[in-house]
């Protein structure tokens, strides 16, 4: 397999060419790839407002910082909010602290559900070592801090994936995709899906037809996909709030089917697609992963994290 030279990782920071290409003598090459103008929230920001900020900016995570010192306190991700909505132990905030009152719960401060003890890199770190840390610890992003623990940037697996668009010409999707793919049907309950995603750290699930008239052994047709972002977007949509007939989270979420949340249709790639072309697709469509399909059969799923693994293996 062709080696992936980290010099091929192209900086995506906005600004002057000089700023992009001349690193401080005190910085590692990771800073050339990292986003430096990081949007953050203070720990008192409500869960609802944080979720809205994430959707408005198409973020899957936002660092939480001390408003006075700028020091990193934690990070909140889409999966933290899904955990809160019913997927895991953070649902206890709704159930017990807020007595099942959904509106009360989403106005709780983000510090209640943020992830603490975040793995970080420092501004002297290299691309190569950051990739290894992210892969080894199964994290999709790492804040970058200075010696005083002040946030100076953030790097995500998406940064690496998009930087290698068109570069990975020898590596194929079939060599890096996850083949043990789990699919669900549109009628699956929201409660089951959120619990399953949180328990298995899945950020997306392909959705296949549940037509009982399909002959046995016929591949189930891919009809959509549900992602952590889809779920987040659904629960901050004005339409959702306008249709609420109760404040009870249990009643609001209990009868919900994933068909109401999912994205209909789904971008796909074939197994022999080059990783570089897959990276181009991620960049063009602003998505983080797609099902791998051949002859209408879902064979696997490929994501930004798999590209990170390809870099780490090289």
Image (spheres, helix red, strand yellow):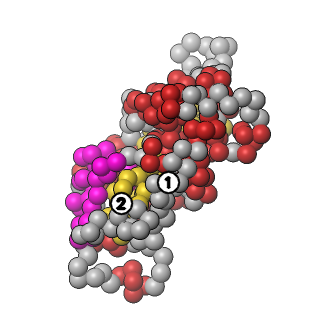
Residue name at image x 65 percent, y 13 percent = 212
Where 165 sits versus 222, above or below? below
Residue name at image x 23 percent, y 79 percent = 26
Residue extent of the magenta highlight: 116-141
Where 303 sits versus 212, above or below? below
- Please provide percent x and percent y for residue 11: 40, 72
Let me know if residue 224 is in the magenta part.
no
Q: In the structure shown, which secondary structural element does the residue marked by tag 1 occupy?
A: loop
Looking at the image, residue 207 sits to the left or right of residue 211; the answer is left
Is residue 263 in view? Answer: no
Q: Earlier in the sequence, mark 1 or mark 2?
A: 1
- Are there few (<14), some (14-19), or many (20+) residues within 10 Å of tag 2? many
Q: State which quadrant residue 242 falls in.
A: top right
Residue name at image x 44 percent, y 65 percent = 67
- Please provide percent x and percent y for residue 101: 61, 32
Query: Which residue, given by chain and number where applicable, does mark 1 sit on?
Result: 44
Query: Which residue, given by chain and number where applicable, does mark 2 sit on?
Result: 72
Q: In the structure shown, which secondary structural element does the residue marked by tag 2 occupy?
A: strand
Looking at the image, residue 115 sits to the left or right of residue 211; the answer is left
Looking at the image, residue 149 sits to the left or right of residue 275; the answer is left
């Amino acid at each position: 397999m062709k080696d992936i030279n980290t010099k091929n990782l192209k900086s995506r920071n906005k600004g002057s060419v000089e700023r992009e290409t001349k690193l401080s003598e005190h910085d590692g090459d990771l800073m050339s790839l990292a986003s430096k103008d990081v949007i953050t929230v203070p720990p008192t920001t409500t869960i609802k407002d944080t979720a809205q900020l994430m959707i408005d900016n198409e973020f899957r995570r936002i660092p939480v910082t001390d408003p006075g010192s700028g020091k990193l306190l934690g990070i909140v991700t889409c999966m933290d909010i899904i955990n809160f909505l019913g997927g895991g132990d953070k649902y206890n905030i709704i159930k017990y602290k807020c007595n099942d009152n959904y509106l009360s719960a989403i106005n709780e401060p983000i510090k209640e559900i943020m992830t603490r003890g975040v793995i970080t890199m420092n501004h002297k770190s290299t691309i190569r070592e950051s990739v290894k840390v992210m892969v080894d610890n199964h994290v999709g992003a790492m804040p970058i801090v200075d010696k005083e623990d002040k946030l100076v940037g953030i790097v995500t697996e998406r940064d690496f994936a998009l930087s290698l668009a068109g570069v990975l010409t020898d590596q194929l999707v079939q060599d890096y995709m996850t083949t043990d793919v789990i699919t669900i049907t549109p009628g699956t309950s929201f409660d089951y899906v959120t619990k399953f995603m949180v328990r298995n750290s899945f950020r997306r699930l392909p959705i296949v037809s549940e037509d009982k008239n399909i002959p046995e052994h016929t591949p189930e047709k891919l009809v959509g996909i549900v992602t952590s972002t889809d779920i987040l977007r659904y629960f901050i949509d004005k339409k959702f709030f306008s249709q609420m007939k109760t404040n009870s989270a249990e009643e609001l979420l209990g009868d919900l089917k994933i068909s109401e949340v999912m994205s209909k249709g789904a971008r796909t790639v074939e197994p022999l697609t080059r990783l570089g072309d897959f990276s181009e697709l991620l960049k063009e469509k602003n998505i983080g992963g797609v099902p791998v399909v051949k002859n209408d059969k879902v064979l696997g799923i490929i994501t930004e994290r798999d590209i990170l693994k390809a870099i780490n293996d090289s």
